[in-house]
Amino acid sequence: MSWDGDALAGQMEEIFERQQAVADARAARGGSTAEERSRSAQFESMRVSRSRIMTQLTLATNPSHRATLERALQAINDQMAEDEARG
């Protein structure tokens, strides 16, 4: 599995921007539910983990370590996309 960092980063940035816009709209209308806050916190946690993994991936030279990082990154990306699809 090859890692196309530019395309992947662009795609995930779009997802992040859409979710951030939704969060901003909720805040502007006067609050959010406990579920919305929980989803927002979970998304932020995934975003931080994703960023950390991407940094590690740029520095990794061992093929098995890179493969592990790529799988972890793909899992986070899949979860973020799934959460985005659910709304």
Image: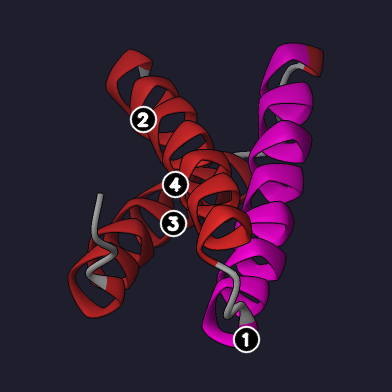
Q: Are marks 2 and 4 in contact (CB under 8 Å)?
A: yes
Q: Are marks 4 and 1 in contact (CB under 8 Å)?
A: no
Mark 4 or 1, closer to the camera = 1
The residue stretch that appears in magenta: 35-59
Quadrant hosting residue 48: bottom right
Magenta run includes residue 58: yes
Which residue is labeled 2 in the image? 84
Q: Are marks 3 and 4 in contact (CB under 8 Å)?
A: yes
Q: Crowdedness of circle 3 by 10 Å Cα count: few (<14), some, many (20+)?
A: some
Q: Which three-letter amino acid code belongs to the residue tagged 2?
A: Glu
Q: Does residue 37 lie above or below 51 as drawn? A: above
Which residue is labeled 3 in the image? 16
Compute the Cα span from label 2 to label 4. 7 Å
Find numbered disc 1 in the image and state the secondary structure of the residue it sits on.
Answer: helix
Q: Which three-letter amino acid code belongs to the residue tagged 3?
A: Phe
Find numbered disc 3 in the image and state the secondary structure of the residue it sits on.
Answer: helix
Which residue is labeled 4 in the image? 19
Find numbered disc 4 in the image and state the secondary structure of the residue it sits on.
Answer: helix
